[in-house]
Every structure is written in structure tokens, then in C-alpha cells.
Amino acid sequence: MQAYKGFSAFFDTGRWNLRRFVETGGMPSSHSASVAALSTAVGLQEGFGSALFGVTLYFSLVVMYDAAGLRRAAGKHAAVLNRLIERHFRQPQDDTQRLMELLGHTPFEVLVGGLLGVLSALLWNRIHPL
């Protein structure tokens, strides 16, 4: 999922931005895809009624909630702080470092990441049965 972001940035701008291969935020949520794939794989292997599946599902929901909630809010706060610094300091580049604004995800980005994770785990299970 993360590789898609790097290639997508290239196709949008015509230039490589290698940071997009490792940065957070954007479509789709790689964190959501990873934990959804984990939960799905555990459910297929151990059973969807197992305690281990319950633990991984809970973990997945916490990660997804954090991506769309707390980290997204922190990114919005960073954007506001960056604007304040640019407007109220004479030479902000000398005194401060810009905060990273693309931290979290919209709920739709989390949903798409989660669906891609489930689909990839199902596909992997079909290709390599457990």
C-alpha cells in the first residue's frame, strides 16, 4: 500500500518524491491495511471465534481509530501552527522548522486501507492456503 503512495505522487507531479514511500497519511491508509490483513489472516488461521482473533481485531480497531482521529487532529494542529509561524515571525525559516502536516487519514482513507488489507489477506490465503 505504501508503494502506491510513492508512485501516485510521481504520476501526479512528474517528479519523484521518495519521502512519500515512507511518510504517513494519504490514500490509502497503510496502517489500516496492515492491521486488517493481520486480523483477517489470524481469523482464517485460528478461527474468527478465537481469542487471538479477538485480540488482533481490537488492536486493529485501535490503530484505525487512532489514524482517523488523533493523528488526523495532530496534522490539522500542525497546519494551523505552521500558518501562525509564517504570519507572525519575521524570518520563520531561521527560528523554526515546519511541522509535518500529513499525519493522519480521513475516515474514507482508513476504510479503503482496511478493505485492501482484508482483500489482500483473502487473496494470499487463496494462493497459499494455510
Image: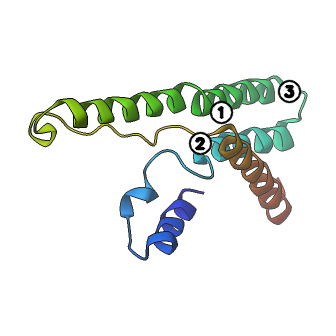
**Residue 19 screen position, x and y as percent:** 37, 57
Q: Measure the alpha-carbon separation of dots 3 and 1.
A: 21 Å
Secondary structure found at label 3: loop
Quadrant in the picture for residue 98:
top left
Label 2 sits on residue: 31
- Identify the residue at image location x=21%, y=38%: 97
Label 3 sits on residue: 50
Instruction: Locate residue 54 relative to residue 75 in the image: left or right.
Output: right
Q: 45 above or below 18?
A: above
Q: Nearer the viewer, residue 33 or 83?
A: 83
Quadrant in the picture for residue 123:
bottom right
In the rendered structure, find residue 64 and report the number of the disc placed on it: 1
The type of residue carrying mark 1 is Met
- Identify the residue at image location x=73%, y=43%: 111
Label 1 neighbour load within 10 Å: few <14, some 14-19, many 20+: many
Q: Nearer the viewer, residue 59 or 22?
A: 22
Q: 12 above or below 91?
A: below
- Identify the residue at image location x=53%, y=63%: 3
Q: Measure the alpha-carbon separation of dots 2 and 3.
A: 23 Å
